Amino acid sequence: MELNDQVTINAPKAVVYAALNDPEILRQCIPGCEELIKNSETELEAKVVLKVGPVKARFSGTVELDTSGAPDAFSLTGQGNGGPAGHAKGGADVTLVETDGKTVLTYQAKAEITGKLAQLGSRLIQGTAKKLAASFFQKFAEVVDNVDA
């Protein structure tokens, strides 16, 4: 599964980049996030509860950041275990471009899902993933606007 999109955030790139590296801001924005722990500058640990169609699962997972292109770009890879519901792994490439005090965030993400979730069908999974991504970025933009204010 692949997701690509871009969102404009009413804040300078430095503020957006800092927010993307703030576990408390991310925890507020990730749908279903119960816990987000920053183990190091490049490693996060998360616990997230998601409902996809009839399947509800609690995922525990890790995310590794590659910040070598920061603050203009960075990549992340991660994997999560949802027990009987399945496993997920994937990654995303994110770019940030500032124009007139606003930042355009563009992402390209890929994910693989196995287990019960994979059996639900790609349309339901893709639709849910798009909805979750839209929810994350809407909340992220709101939180960053308030942080910057």
Image (spheres, rainbow, N blue to C red):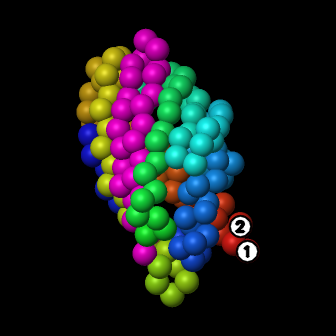
Could you tell me if residue 66 is visible in this image? yes
Q: Residue at horizontal 56%, vertical 57%? A: 20
Give the left or right position of residue 58, taking residue 34 as reference: left
Give the left or right position of residue 13, taking residue 109 as reference: right
What amino acid type is highlighted by mark number 1? Ala
The magenta span reads 73-97
Q: Residue at horizontal 35%, vertical 17%? A: 116
In the rendered image, the vertical position of residue 86 relative to residue 129, given as above or below:
above
How crowded is the residue under tag 1: few (<14 C-alpha within 10 Å), some, or many (20+)? few
In the rendered image, the vertical position of residue 2 relative to residue 84, given as above or below:
below
Name the foreground residue: 128 vs 106: 106
Q: CA distance from mark 1 to mark 2?
A: 5 Å
The outermost residue toward the bottom is 100
User: For residue 90, what is the image quadrant?
Assistant: top left
Q: Secondary structure at mark 2?
A: helix
Q: Is residue 81 magenta?
A: yes
Helix, strand or loop: magenta stretch: strand
Image quarter (top left, top right, bottom left or bottom right) of the C terminus: bottom right
Q: Secondary structure at mark 1?
A: loop
What amino acid type is highlighted by mark number 2? Asn
Q: Which residue is mark 2?
A: 146
Q: Residue at horizontal 43%, vertical 12%? A: 84
User: Across the whole image, how many numbered discs are drawn on residues?
Assistant: 2
User: For residue 119, what is the image quadrant?
Assistant: top left
The x and y percentages for residue 133 are: 45, 49
In the rendered image, the vertical position of residue 96 relative to residue 78, given as above or below:
below
How crowded is the residue under tag 2: few (<14 C-alpha within 10 Å), some, or many (20+)? few
Do labels 1 and 2 touch, CB within 8 Å?
yes
Q: Which residue is mark 1?
A: 149
The x and y percentages for residue 58 are: 54, 23
The x and y percentages for residue 108 are: 32, 54
